[in-house]
């Protein structure tokens, strides 16, 4: 009798785990198919989050995330930076591009907001 009770208890636990794990995984908010990448060409001093090329990437990243949050863009997955020499301009005006491309990964549901804010969808 003691063996049967232990067997039943173990089987019940195993069955619960088999039922609960798929449910928890289906509730995950991390759906890679729902991601889209946007880009922004950094300017000398005309970016709306008020950082520029002299600020660190970390400070710029925090400013971008705050700016996007304030403008209703949630679920920002990542912000990264890449230098493209062909985009660097020699002028010193605020609107001139520095050559740094800022990439922001977010959900597809934010696409219209990102485009309205001036971000370009990466294709």
Image (cartoon, rainbow, N blue to C red):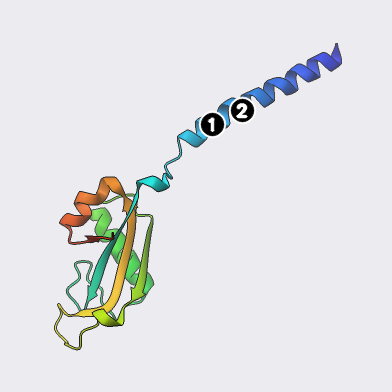
Residue 7 % position (x, y)? 79, 19
Above-or-below relation of 24 to 97: above
Q: Circle 1 is placed at which residue position?
A: 22
Circle 2 crowding by C-alpha within 10 Å: few under 14, some 14–19, many from 20? few
Contact, mark 1 vs mark 2 (Cβ under 8 Å): yes
Is 113 placed left or right of 6 in the picture? Answer: left
Query: In percent of the image, x 20 and y 51: which residue is there?
Result: 113
The image quarter containing residue 54 is bottom left
Q: Quadrant of the N terminus?
A: top right
Disc 2 is placed on an element classified as helix
Residue most toward the front?
123
Q: Quadrant of residue 13?
A: top right
Q: Residue at x 34, y 66 (%)?
A: 61
Toward which corner of the image does residue 6 lie, by quadrant? top right
Q: Is residue 54 visible?
A: no
Secondary structure type for disc 1: helix
Q: Residue at x 27, y 54 (%)?
A: 69
Q: Where in the figure is residue 121, as x and y percent of width and height?
A: 25, 58
Q: Which mark is residue 45?
A: none
Q: Is residue 8 left or right of residue 42?
A: right
24 displayed left or right of 122: right
What residue do we see at 17% from left, 80% from top?
Answer: 96
Q: Which residue is labeled 2 in the image? A: 18
Q: Quadrant of the C terminus?
A: bottom left
């Amino acid at each position: 009798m003691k063996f049967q009770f232990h067997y039943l208890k173990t089987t019940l636990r195993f069955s619960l785990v088999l039922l609960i794990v798929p449910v928890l995984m289906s509730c995950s908010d991390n759906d890679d198919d729902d991601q889209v990448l946007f880009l922004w060409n950094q300017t000398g001093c005309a970016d709306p989050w008020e950082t520029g090329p002299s600020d660190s990437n970390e400070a710029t990243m925090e400013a971008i995330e705050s700016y996007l949050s304030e403008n209703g863009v949630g679920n920002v997955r990542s912000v990264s930076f890449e230098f493209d020499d062909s985009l660097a301009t020699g002028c010193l005006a605020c609107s001139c591009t520095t050559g740094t491309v800022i990439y922001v990964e977010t959900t597809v549901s934010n696409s219209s907001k990102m485009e309205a804010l001036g971000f370009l969808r990466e294709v």
